[in-house]
Image (tube, helix red, strand yellow):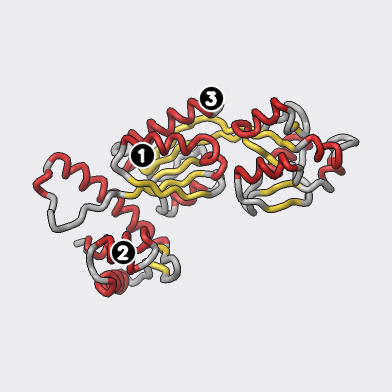
Amino acid sequence: MLDYPALRAVAAVVQTGSFEKAAAVLNVTPSAVSQRVKQLEERLGVVLIVRGTPCTATEKGGWLCRHMENVGMLEGELMTHLPALADPAEPQQPVTLHIATSADSLGTWFLSAMSDFSRRSRYLLNIALDDEEHTAEWLQRGRVLAAVTSLEKPIPGCRCAPIGVLRYHATASPAFMSEHFAGGVTQEAISRAPALTFNQKDRLQSRWLRQAFGRDFVHPTHWLPSTQGFLDASLSGMGWCMNPALLAGPHLAAGRLVELIPKTPLDVPLYWQINRLAADRLAELTRAVVAAARMHLRQ
């Protein structure tokens, strides 16, 4: 039999980041939470929580947390039909859904989907950010229930649907173009002109270079992990970068930004993947994502 008090303790520690906060959520003492977690770890023979500030789940702990999300959805559904089952002495905690997306999607269209869903739903949301080429890993490892990803192939145990294309433009300010590309946008010029890169997983610049020049090559770069920061930095002349068309469009139209090479957009197809066990209960979430994608993304 599953020890659900212990499972709830694990989920609460991971959700809040500490044993003390989990104790407050569960209305028990921190020592009780610690004991439940320790006994479950000893029984399973694995570490479920990495103790730290904050506390985080191991891969096995993450799977237990996703199980508790599914249990919470089932219990919530059951209580709507049989409210007498609820224990008045036990506080009812809202279920938090874990979802992964990219910073560019969040900064352009995804937040509108989440806002729409949250207004119509009893669920809370925990949105994790990673490159769209890597959010699928969060699903594969059981760290999230759903993700926006560039992976077309369905992840085992998930439903997958295409939702649209996020278009990017290689852009820079007119002043930057005059300083670094006065003789044209050549491989030699790009090899000297500073770019902007989100992080080590960001391959958009490399993909555009292969598309425009037939090959990737080394170029200097600033590191800037912010979608809005990318836009602001390119407007200020700090470097050239791949900006989402949804953000760069007005600045391109006004001449505040220009394309390095006209009419060379980079299109990134996006897919919505959701855990099959939760898909039917979260049909409203999928509808919100699809509706926002149809409104903002290229179809």
Q: Of label 3 and label 1, which has the lower sequence position?
A: 1
Mark whose residue sits in front, 2 or 3: 2
Q: Where is residue 257 in the image (x, y as percent from the top left)?
A: 73, 33
The residue under label 3 is which amino acid type? Gln
- 118 sits left or right of 102 in the view: left
Proximity of marks 2 and 3: CB atoms separated by less than 8 Å: no
The residue under label 2 is which amino acid type? Ala
Residue positioned 51% across, 34% down in the render: 109
Decide: few, some or many residues near mark 1? Use Cα within 10 Å; few <14, some 14-19, many ≥20. Answer: some
Q: Name the residue under label 2.
A: 22
Q: Secondary structure under badge 2? A: helix
Decide: few, some or many residues near mark 2? Use Cα within 10 Å; few <14, some 14-19, many ≥20. Answer: many
Residue 43 visible in the displayed image: no
Q: Where is residue 92 in the image (x, y as percent from the top left)?
A: 21, 52
Q: Of label 2 and label 3, which has the lower sequence position?
A: 2
Q: Position of residue 137 (x, y in %)?
A: 49, 51
Q: Of label 2 and label 1, which has the lower sequence position?
A: 2
Proximity of marks 3 and 1: CB atoms separated by less than 8 Å: no
Residue positioned 73% across, 42% down in the render: 236
Q: Mark 3 points at which residue?
A: 299
Indicate whether 175 appears above or below 263: below
- 259 sits left or right of 198 in the view: right
Q: Secondary structure under badge 3? A: loop
**Residue 40 in which image quadrant:** bottom left
Q: Name the residue under label 1.
A: 118
Q: Where is residue 112 in the image (x, y as percent from the top left)?
A: 45, 35
